[in-house]
Image (tube, helix red, strand yellow):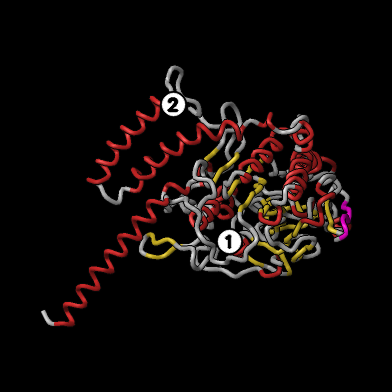
Amino acid sequence: MNRREFLYGVNGGLGALAFHSMLQAEQAKGPLAPKAAHFPKAKAKRCIFLYMAGGPSHIDTFDPKPKLKELHLQKFKRSSKFLSAMGSGDRYYVQSPFKFNQVGQSGTQLCEHWQHLAGVADELCIYRGCQAESINHPTANYHMNTGNRFGGDPAIGSWVTYGLGSENQDLPGYVVLPEVAYPQGGAANWSNGFLPPHYQGTTLRAKGSPILDLHPPKGVTRGQQRSNLDLLAKLNKAHAEKNPGHEELAARMDSYELAYRMQMKVPGILDLGQEKESTREAYGLNDQHTKEFGRRLLLARRLIERGVRFVQAYTAGWDSHDYINRSHAERIRSVDKPIASLIKDLKERGLLDETLIVWCGEFGRTPDNGKRGGGERLGRDHNKNAMAIWMAGGGVKAGHTIGATDEIGEHASEVVHPIRDLHVTFLRLMGLDDNKLTYFHGGRFKQLSQTGGELIKELIT
């Protein structure tokens, strides 16, 4: 061996040793240990994602279209199969049954039923330029939540916790608050996909005990439970040494330990009786119409206060193909007070600037319907070409309405961007670079936007 070969071999050995040491140190910290952001100056440290499953109508919530009053019930034929879930044929333009008000110093336009949200309108950044790619609920849900219309990829909450870790190692980094009935597409909407299992969303059930087996079985002490876990860990460790690189086994071992720690922490977090009665009232917990979503949002606030990185709260019923007057009014009523209270509460606690709040569904709705007649029977079909999304806190341009749709709300027409650009923007607000937040899988480095995207600069301060 000559001198050059000797030095090359030594350097290679030292490099491998250093790499192994770094890997061990990383593993010792744990997969959910806090990590540095790509953009340290980003304001948002955590996210509460409010998902309106079913596709809320932008025309009847945040994007008024007076032109539809002139066209109301005019008949025409539609031939595009990609605009409406109800297909082609005779169509009828439908005006909004709601009035719109200009509220706040910003003059933000809101449907009349947003009575409480009107009080925090100057905190909102409403975006009217987004376009989806699917008119079917499951594929559209997957696209908004994971960037992939066909499912199987990591959810945005998984990507965020993969990139930033969690601020509390005794709680999951990504928590999902669903209704009893899951949204179309099911749990794949908050899956870890090809990321390690530690980054999967942890669901808190809407009925009964939020987490099964949260308390030890009757007659089992904490000491006995700890001894059982220690024995199990010893056996699992021996098995893991014989099967290196077994991520599922490692995640299962970690989940047992996390579950043990959660038994100490979670019951207190879930006890909303610890909140003041005035707080419970503000979130609508004493009102039959608002108590379910209000409970989820109060839980969301308590979770992010304690270091959970990403919380997603679901509510369904926005798929108003008919009776939009009745159904959308009821849906707005069920979420209006809880959402406004969440924004106020976070601001009073000094948390709003560091918390990104997102409100969206999977797509928008058409300015027309295929049903004849007027009154409450009228509704709207699915529309991938126009939708309304709003954000608050976390470095967004508060008190602004960005983008626009055409005069009847059928197509986005200004500041038009696809969902992948929205994802890039969400990540940037959280201090993450979509081009750097990658994971090698299936022969290539993958990312939330799938193939890269463009930052929507107009949404960021």
**Dominant secondary structure of the residues highlighted in magenta in the image:** strand
Assess disc 2: are there few (<14), some (14-19) or many (≥20) residues with their C-alpha within 10 Å of its C-alpha.
few
Q: To which quarter of the image does residue 353 belong?
A: bottom right
The earlier-in-sequence mark between 1 and 2 is 2
* Badge 2 element: helix
| Residue at x 81% of width, y 64% of height | 407
User: Which residue bears the numbered disc 1?
Assistant: 427
| Residue at x 32% of width, y 60% of height | 21
**Closest to the observer: 303 or 151?**
303
| Residue at x 59% of width, y 35% of height | 181
Q: Are marks 1 and 2 in contact (CB under 8 Å)?
A: no
Q: Is residue 301 above or below residue 386?
A: above
Q: What amino acid is at disc 1?
A: Leu
Is residue 195 toward the left or the right of residue 423 in the image? left
User: Which residue bears the numbered disc 2?
Assistant: 222
Q: What amino acid is at disc 2?
A: Arg
